[in-house]
Amino acid sequence: MTRLQGRFLVDLLIRRAEAAGGFAAILASGDADAGAILVQCSDRGASGPLLERRFALTGGYLWEAVGPDESADAATRAAYVERRRIADPDLWIVELDIANAPQLVAEWGLLA
């Protein structure tokens, strides 16, 4: 199984979000080849889940909700993201603002 580069995957997610009428931005650049990816989902500014791409025990990847849920205040969520960034400087952090962002991430994840 070919492993796609982190930068390629992030660029693909941004293009898919923009093509669907949404907004996406890179908040932190990770390792271009192998960085993990954390997506901050929102819909018209309302917080959604934080999703992270992780290795599955079966050999592929899976998307997992991580950190505080969308009901947490902005400071709590920002603190979690900052802790993840400090713990993993290779981490890509992407903001995605589009209706049904988790579904877009799941569909995009099937390509990766």
Image: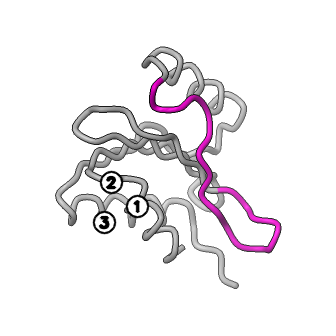
- Asked if residue 29 lies in the magenta stretch, the reply is no
Q: Residues within 10 Å of mark 3 (few under 14, many from 20)?
A: some
The magenta-colored residue range is 54-71
Q: Is residue 59 above or below residue 97?
A: below
- Asked if residue 66 lies in the magenta stretch, the reply is yes
Write down the residue under mark 1. 103
Q: Secondary structure at mark 2?
A: loop
Instruction: Name the residue at 50% across, 44% down.
Output: 29
Mark 1 → mark 3, Cα distance in angstroms: 12 Å
Instruction: Name the residue at 49% across, 42% down.
Output: 93
Report the amino acid beneath label 2: Asn
* Left or right: 107 as drawn, with respect to 42: right
Instruction: Name the residue at 45% across, 26% down.
Output: 71
* Left or right: 106 as drawn, with respect to 15: right
Q: Residues within 10 Å of mark 1 (few under 14, many from 20)?
A: few
Instruction: Name the residue at 67% across, 28% down.
Output: 86
Marks 1 and 2 in Cβ contact (< 8 Å): yes
> Residue 63 location, x and y as percent?
59, 58
Q: Is residue 8 above or below residue 47?
A: below
- Which label number is shown at residue 16? 3
Report the amino acid beneath label 3: Arg
- Which label number is shown at residue 1? none
> Residue 6 location, x and y as percent?
56, 60
Q: Nearer the viewer, mark 3 or mark 2?
A: 2
Marks 1 and 3 in Cβ contact (< 8 Å): no
> Residue 106 location, x and y as percent?
47, 65
Mark 1 → mark 2, Cα distance in angstroms: 6 Å
Mark 3 → mark 2, Cα distance in angstroms: 13 Å
> Residue 61 location, x and y as percent?
67, 67
State which quarter of the image contains the C terminus: bottom right
Q: Residues within 10 Å of mark 2 (few under 14, many from 20)?
A: few
